Amino acid sequence: MIRVGINGYGTIGKRIADAVRAQPDMEVCGVGKVRPDYVAVNADEAGYPLYVIDGEYADQFREAAIDVAGTVDELVAESDVVIDATPAGIGAENRPLYERHDTPALFQGGEDATVAEVSFNSRANFEEAADADYARVVSCNTTGLSRLVAPLSETVGIEKVRATLVRRGGDPDQTSRGPINDVLPDPVSIPSHHGPDVQTVFPELAVETIGLTVPTTMMHVHAVNVTLESEPDDEAEIRDLLAAEDRIVLVPGYAGIDGTGALKDMALDAGRPRGDIWENAVWEESITLSGRDLYCLQAIHQESDVVPENVDAVRALTGHLSADESRALTNEVLGIGFERFQTRRGTAVDRTAAD
Ligand code: NAD
């Protein structure tokens, strides 16, 4: 069993903790938390040992009748691998702590790429993390773009990617984020920083991105144009290529999923924990070819698409399983794939005719 400590138990950290705990080859030694808020109460209820980041707050935890297992320093000492899911920028400050204990660590996409030797995406470069002590699991947007780019670059080849990222203003618990009633060019300068971040995974890729931020907490939506190196036979070739990807779901036209609200509703109805959508959701009808130019629209659930990537990254760092083995196990345990769409593809019975 790989003992995993999770330092920072917020939007990403709490999801990672649940995903790690579900794996047959991993256990959660504990989670690092700053304050005894509702998230800490739920962590306690879920049975995660809580380690305080700052001893000053330990008494407040006790006053709230939340047991404190120790300090984050102790959590790091007990862990085989630490997953740092603290707010952007804090992870880099924490790296000396992990080095002091000689504990391999994963950082998140809010950190600068220089925080670790490798910027990790399980589909694209699992093996590159094999000899690393530190890796950065790239951001939700970069994960989403990497999953799309990988199969296209391996088969038809990519001349250039252009993507407009329509980003959610904040996560559901982030009351201070916005805009409330606006559409922001964000950043206003073009290209945005997202393209260079994708290049931390695909150094040779020509990619340019534009960012906007809109008043929703649901998901990001990417409008993507890929100029391919060769012209596919037809759109079906691209659809089949993407449908074969384990962490891409093609949203069929008949499903009536006309936006991110319906996607989230679908996920909640399907009983997904927290309504999470770990896969890229590519609208099947948006896949369009014009010569060598491919267009599509995909939705990315910012709170959860990096979660299976973190699970795989633990195995990559420890050299415990191969990329294919790890991905298959993670997918199976978490229930990734939205099978209900895949199994219905082309198998529907015409009941009107039968009756
Ligand atoms: P968050 O604010 O929801 O959670 C961070 C947690 O870390 C909180 O529990 C906070 O109390 C705790 N924390 C605060 N200061 C700390 C410290 N000094 N040491 C340890 N813990 C501390 O943040 P998040 O949205 O989960 O983001 C975490 C990381 O994941 C960031 O790098 C972010 O960029 C990245 N990320 C976020 C999203 C997203 O949409 N939320 C998506 C992908 C990647």
Image (cartoon, helix red, strand yellow):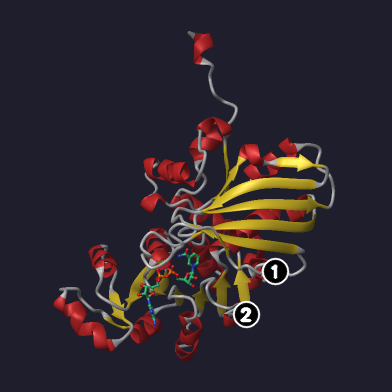
Question: Of residues 251 and 340, which is closer to you in this image?
Answer: 251
Q: Earlier in the sequence, mark 1 or mark 2?
A: 2
Look at the numbered disc 2 and give the secondary structure of its residue. loop
The single residue placed furthest to the top in the displayed view is 355
Distance (Cα) linking label 1 and label 2: 14 Å
The single residue placed furthest to the front in the displayed view is 181
Look at the numbered disc 1 and give the secondary structure of its residue. helix
In the depicted structure, whether residue 298 falls above or below residue 110: above
Q: Is mark 1 within 8 Å of ligand 1?
A: no
Amino acid type shown at disc 2: Glu
Q: Is residue 246 visible?
A: no
Q: Position of residue 202 (x, y in %)?
A: 71, 66
Tell me the number on the disc at residue 199. 1
In the depicted structure, whether residue 193 falls above or below residue 339: below
Q: Position of residue 14 (x, y in %)?
A: 37, 65
Which residue, given by chain and number where applicable, does mark 2 sit on?
Answer: 117
Mark 2 burial class by Cα count in 10 Å: few <14, some 14-19, many 20+: some
Residue in the image at 69% along x and 67% along y: 190
Residue in the image at 47% along x and 61% along y: 169
Q: Is mark 2 within 8 Å of ligand 1?
A: no
Judged left or right of residue 307, residue 249 is right
Quadrant of ligand 1: it is: bottom left
Q: Is residue 199 visible?
A: yes
Amino acid type shown at disc 1: Gln
